């Protein structure tokens, strides 16, 4: 009877381990994406014919459809210089599509805004160029020295449109104009608001430039410059 009990307990233990592995080892497809594969992940949902964002079709950003022919004329509503540059980028990198790029840019925008507000330097590092990373971390350190912390809630991205594009050597540069709605406040160590309004949604316009060496196997783009247009934030 003693050996039978030991054998029975062993069977129960094996059963529980197998059940646990079957649950923990199963990928649901909803795992959080790491910061290093934002642009690298193709939009599998779109490829399978299902919505890509929260069960809804992606917003119609200005995606310029590129023909196979280099000499094809640009659409009337597309600046010819930008259109020609996007053609060059696509020719240098056959995997480049504007739809995937803009989807990746949206995700990068959300993540960078979140990580900067939290002061998460490690997560920011792979998304930013060394120069931009240096500027961001300096701002985070200055905020920390004052005993302040930022709270930013990104209500949503109203639009993400290609504002400019250039090709220098092997490196492609694409500037995206983001129009977003957010609530942002900075609080001191006592929790008092020193800037911003926690009850006000602000519309912000930002120009972010992403760059990538088209001969690099890494499909990700890095943020290399940020700029705010003159007609910047306007309160709703």
Image (cartoon, rainbow, N blue to C red):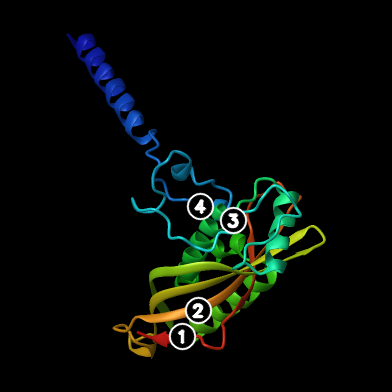
The local secondary structure at tag 2 comes to strand
Residue 214 as seen in the image, left or right of residue 34: right
* Badge 3 vs badge 1, beta-carbon distance below 8 Å: no
Closer to the eye: label 4 or 2: 2
At label 4, counting other C-alpha atoms closer than 10 Å, the crowd grade (few under 14, some 14-19, many 20 or more) is: few
Determine which of the numbered discs, if any, sits on residue 98 in the image.
3
| Residue at disc 1, secondary structure | loop
Residue that mark 1 sits on? 233
Mark 1 to mark 2 CA distance (whole Å): 6 Å
Tell which circle, 4 or 3, labels the residue nearer the N-terminal end: 4
Circle 1/circle 2 CB separation < 8 Å: yes
Q: Quadrant of the N terminus?
A: top left
**Which residue position holds label 4?**
34
Q: CA distance from mark 4 to mark 3?
A: 21 Å
Q: CA distance from mark 4 to mark 1?
A: 30 Å
Decide which of 219, 101 is in the foreground and name it: 101
Q: CA distance from mark 2 to mark 3?
A: 20 Å
Residue nearest the viewer, comparing 177 with 218? 177
Q: Is residue 198 above or below residue 1?
A: below
- Residue 128, how many percent across, how many down? 62, 66
Residue at horizontal 54 percent and vertical 54 percent from the top: 99
Residue at position x 70%, y 47% from top?
68
* Residue beneath disc 2: 205
Whole-angstrom CA distance, mark 3 to mark 1, is 27 Å
> Measuring 54% from the left and 84% from the top, which residue is drawn there?
142
Asked which secondary structure carries label 4, the reply is loop
């Amino acid at each position: 009877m003693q050996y039978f009990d030991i054998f029975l307990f062993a069977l129960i233990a094996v059963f529980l381990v197998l059940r646990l592995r079957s649950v923990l080892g199963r990928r649901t497809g909803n795992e959080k994406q790491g910061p290093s594969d934002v642009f690298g992940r193709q939009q599998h949902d779109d490829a399978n014919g299902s919505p890509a964002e929260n069960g809804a079709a992606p917003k119609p950003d200005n995606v310029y459809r590129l023909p196979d022919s280099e000499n094809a004329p640009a659409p009337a509503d597309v600046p010819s210089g930008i259109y020609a540059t996007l053609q060059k980028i696509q020719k240098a990198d056959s995997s480049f599509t504007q739809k995937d790029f803009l989807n990746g840019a949206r995700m990068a925008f959300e993540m960078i805004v979140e990580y900067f507000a939290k002061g998460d330097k490690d997560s920011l590092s792979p998304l930013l160029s060394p120069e931009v990373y240096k500027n961001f971390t300096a701002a985070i350190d200055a905020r920390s020295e004052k005993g302040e912390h930022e709270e930013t809630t990104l209500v949503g991205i109203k639009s993400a449109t290609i504002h400019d594009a250039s090709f220098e050597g092997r490196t492609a540069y694409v500037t995206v104009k983001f129009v977003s709605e957010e609530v942002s406040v900075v609080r001191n160590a006592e929790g008092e608001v020193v800037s911003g309004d926690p009850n006000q949604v602000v519309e912000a316009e930002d120009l972010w430039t992403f760059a990538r060496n088209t001969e690099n196997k890494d499909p990700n783009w890095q943020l290399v410059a940020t700029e705010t247009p003159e007609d910047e934030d306007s309160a709703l």
